[in-house]
Image (cartoon, grey):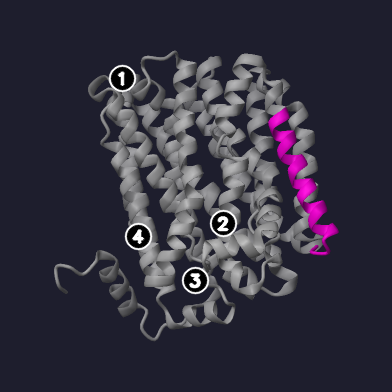
Amino acid sequence: MTHSEPNSGTLERDARVITADHSVAPGEIAVGVVIGRASEYFDFFVYGIASCLVFPALFFPFASPLEGTLYAFVVFSFAFIARPIGTAISMAVQQRWGRATKLTMALFLLGTCTVGIAFLPGYGTAGATSIILLSVLRIGQGLALGGSWDGLPSLLAMNAPKEKRGWYAMLGQLGAPVGFIVATALFAFLYASLNLNEFLAWGWRYAFFVAFAINVVALFARLRLVVTHEYEQLLEARELDAVDTTDLVRTQGRNLVIGAFAPLASYALFHIVTVFPLSWIQLFTHQSITQFLLIQILGGFLAAAGIVASGKIADRVGRRSTLGALAVMIAVFSGFAPTLLDGGTLGQDVFILIGFILLGLSYGQASGAVTDNFIGRYRYSGAALTADLAWLIGAAFAPLVALGLSAHFGLGYVSVYLLSGAGCTLAALSINRALGQD
């Protein structure tokens, strides 16, 4: 190897050596999907939890606790804004240099940005520069996540028997609760083991250090699949390859819009039960942070069970019918949200547990529910960009909007936010059916 050979080439070469004469089994694809998504969600939930417990005091000490948290949530949204841009760039990289190079670059960037945050000085040391650096690294996380799409979930879904498409579709979604559970458990341990000064000074940084190690494991696990000859043949047979983003938007714009709004009920609920309530508990209640994190961990397990159950339900009644029914349930749940969040420890815990159950059932089928609308050659890129837009519209500003409006005008606005997401899902599914694409 010469000194100019890129690190991605080394990793790809090593993966090819290990996978020589090795064929890809469906079970291995499923494992790759879960490992890859879990590592990405771990990174994002580590950042989300820190946005509630650490960043307001560390980077925005000049503001009140509420304002500092709102500022932290503004930076939190930057990754979701950058994500579609990352997808567009990464598709161009894949077209020129290949899927393995794109994936290596994306996960290396994600891990580097995440661990880089661990070394950031606070506002008291570096002033406004610390906020700028945090923002740049957060944007880097978003660009990286946009580039981490490997097509494994689409490959699983398209190779699934017709009567088991819901079951295979949910496998890619299991990474979310796995990543959340691990990130939350790590923060709960650190928060309970250290005093507040130690936690804010250095304890929280360990969670970001762990992310880099997890990314290395996830990178090699996924490269082990994507460099195999059989995997490449499967992708080619299904026309799962990158296309020009401009061409995608021009020819498939309607499908992108429908696909982005169809899962919005689930995406709106996503941060309303994970990130937002932690900030609310921190700012406006006396409930123990550690105990609340443990409740959220239990909620993560319930969400995982809900995701698995969604596969069985969707195969029985249909994926889109499942999404529509869950949107109605989320709309009903939104009516009780203010009462539960304002109902003391018991009410807040009930809100979390019910919310996670609904999240699992709906999120399990939220990915690619209408991506079969795309013409074959656009499906790979269309699935990635559709997810990016859904995250941007439904989840990017959820903690900021929910906390800001609730703090100033009352918890009723949590209901409004969830209700709007449910309405968008039902409208998108109705339009999809009216166009004869159901």
Residue 28 is tagged as: 3
Q: Nearer the viewer, residue 334 or 4?
A: 4
User: Which residue is disc 4 drawn over?
Assistant: 105
Specify which label sits upstream in the sequence, 3 or 4: 3
Q: Which residue occupies 14% across, 72% down?
A: 2
User: Which residue is disc 2 drawn over?
Assistant: 385
Helix, strand or loop at mark 2: helix
Instruction: Assess disc 1: are there few (<14), some (14-19) or many (≥20) residues with their C-alpha within 10 Å of its C-alpha.
Output: few
Question: Magenta region: which residues?
Answer: 416-438
Marks 1 and 2 sit apart, C-alpha to C-alpha, by: 42 Å
- The amino acid marked with disc number 4 is Met
Instruction: Assess disc 4: are there few (<14), some (14-19) or many (≥20) residues with their C-alpha within 10 Å of its C-alpha.
Output: some
Q: Which residue occupies 69% across, 48% down?
A: 261
Instruction: Assess disc 2: are there few (<14), some (14-19) or many (≥20) residues with their C-alpha within 10 Å of its C-alpha.
Output: many
Q: Is residue 275 above or below residue 385?
A: above
User: Which residue is disc 1 drawn over?
Assistant: 197
Q: Nearer the viewer, residue 421 or 205?
A: 421
